[in-house]
Amino acid sequence: MTTRREAREQAFILIFEKSFQPDCEISELVDFANENEVFTADKYAVKLVEDTYANIEKIDSLISANLKGWSSARISKITRAILRMAVCEMLFYDDVPVGVAINEAVEVAKRFAADDEPGYINGVLGSVARSL
């Protein structure tokens, strides 16, 4: 059984991977992860990735409007993937409290991002939360 945190990590990996392969379908990325035993994709993870890309313009616009002193082009692909995932949960998942979405994004960042990025992600998501 996959935990929600593990599902979020899977979703992050898929969103991150899609940033390198924008023309690749999400189902192809999921199949690749399953076939190569990277992980067996969790249903929540796949839904989160699909919902993120179904609403990518709205999500990216909200992220850009809340970046502090950075242009969207300057943030790393890792940070962008984590922000996209968290903002999707904040906007479209009523069963996930905003604070939980932020905390989980920070935890994913602690595992996958540079040392200074968890705090930056927390700040951007806090700003997003205040704007909602």
Image: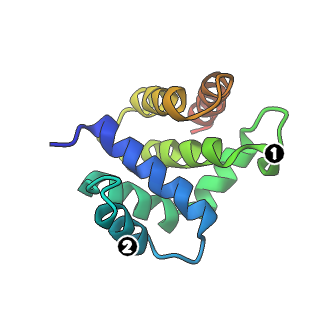
Q: What residue is drawn where x is 66% and y is 49%?
A: 77
Relative image position of residue 118 (x, y in whole percent): 60, 26
Q: Relative to the observer, which residue lies in front, 91 or 100?
A: 100
What is the number of the mark on residue 27?
2
Q: Is residue 58 left or right of residue 92?
A: right
Q: What residue is drawn where x is 39% and y is 29%?
A: 100
Question: In the rendered structure, which disc, 2 or 1, sits on the residue that comes first in sequence?
Answer: 2
Relative image position of residue 125 (x, y in whole percent): 59, 33
Q: Relative to the observer, which residue lies in front, 25 or 92?
A: 25
Relative image position of residue 10 (x, y in whole percent): 38, 48
Q: Quadrant of the C terminus?
A: top right
Instruction: Name which residue type carries label 1.
Output: Arg
Identify whether 87 is placed above or below 112.
below
Instruction: Name which residue type carries label 2.
Output: Ser
How many numbered marks are there?
Answer: 2
Q: Is residue 100 left or right of residue 17?
A: left
Q: What residue is drawn where x is 47% and y is 50%?
A: 13
Task: Give neighbour class at mark 1: few <14, some 14-19, many 20+ (Cα, 10 Å).
Answer: few
Q: Residue under circle 1?
A: 74
Q: Is residue 94 visible?
A: no
Q: Is residue 38 left or right of residue 66?
A: left
Identify whether 43 is placed above or below 79.
below
Task: Give neighbour class at mark 2: few <14, some 14-19, many 20+ (Cα, 10 Å).
Answer: few
